[in-house]
Amino acid sequence: MLYYQDVIKTAEVEIEKVNFPNQQINLVGNIFKPKKFSKDKYSAIVIGHPSGGVKEQTAGVYAALLAEKGFLTLAFDASYQGESGGEPRYLESPAARVEDMRCAVDYLTTRNDVDADNIGILGMCASGGYCIKAAETDLRIKAVATVSMADLGDLFRNGLERNMTEEARKKFLSQISAQRTKEANGAPIFYIGYVPNSEEETVGKQNDYREGYEYYRVSPAKHERSVNKMIFSRLDAVVNFTALDNVKLIAPRPLLIIAGTEANTKYFAEETFNKAEGEKTLHWIQGATHIQLYYVKKYVLEAIAELNKFYGDHLK
């Protein structure tokens, strides 16, 4: 298995903690630079973590392993999450998450060791949707890749594998509206989890949710700043978000989509590929689920090999 705390002990990389702004919010990230390569300017990759995660989990693993290949990589905590600022805490804001990606690119262009004409982006799980949304209009991003990509708005709007009924959707939105009213009138913030918080809560859930509980709550990947909380009353903005309405705008820049054949979310990979135009690749990792691409060594290394070739071909 590949967990962040183990990978950084052996990876041939230098790590630098950095800060950069998203408007009034201070974002905190880690820059990874290869020890085996010495360049005046590096091609760089922005790496976004899954919703509910932090930079010291799978985003950091991919950042370290790609840095070993010769890239400068930036894994950072999203607004309102991890070590980054923003109030109220644990707000899942699609607008902020997309702007985080653009601001990460802003920051990289200010560094003397980055080739500002060769910046790519990598999104994992929900940040895959967010990075696609950012890349649609930010032409500084020269190559776009996703791993286990998901459109978080679609997930909350339609359910995983789109199993939510219209009646259930209306009930869900009614509950959000009612909670907004309660909190506007002084009630405390109510939180829900991204994944189940106990084994009992996984009963009847799809593999992605069960494995999400195992990865985030009980495995060595568990992190003190990944607290599995999001503000329920602000999920109306998430429900209203869509990542895939303008995917064609990424062309002619290249797009690589990596997904596991056993992932409950694999339909997002298929739909992204079908909607995209220009140079696009859908790479299936046989036997892998959504969460297994976060940490199972053979699957992660296969993904890294594809990403290394992709960025090597398109970031000079």
Image (spheres, rainbow, N blue to C red):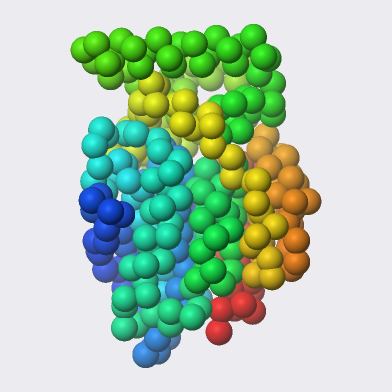
In the displayed structure, would residue 7 be above or below residue 1? below
Quarter residue 159 falls in: top right
Task: Identify which residue, 137 or 93, lies in the foreground.
Answer: 137
Task: Identify which residue, 183 or 74, lies in the foreground.
Answer: 183
Residue at x 53%, y 19% (from the top left corner)? 202
Residue at x 68%, y 14% (from the top left corner)? 165
Total marks shown come to: 0
In the displayed structure, would residue 22 be above or below residue 279? above
Is 67 situated left or right of 206 in this image?
Answer: left
Is 151 situated left or right of 280 in this image?
Answer: left
Quarter residue 91 falls in: top left
Is 193 situated left or right of 149 in this image?
Answer: left
Residue 131, horizontal then vertical, whole percent: 52, 54
Q: Is residue 243 visible?
A: yes
Residue at x 72%, y 40% (from the top left corner)? 267
In the displayed structure, would residue 103 be above or below residue 72? above
Residue 174, horizontal then vertical, whole percent: 49, 11
Q: Residue furthest right?
A: 274
Residue at x 66%, y 38% (from the top left corner)? 265
Residue 291, horizontal then vertical, whole percent: 56, 41
Quarter residue 191 falls in: top left
Quarter the C terminus occupies: bottom right
Q: Is residue 68 visible?
A: no
Residue 156, horizontal then vertical, whole percent: 56, 27
Task: Identify which residue, 205 or 301, lies in the foreground.
Answer: 205
In the displayed structure, would residue 117 be above or below residue 291? below
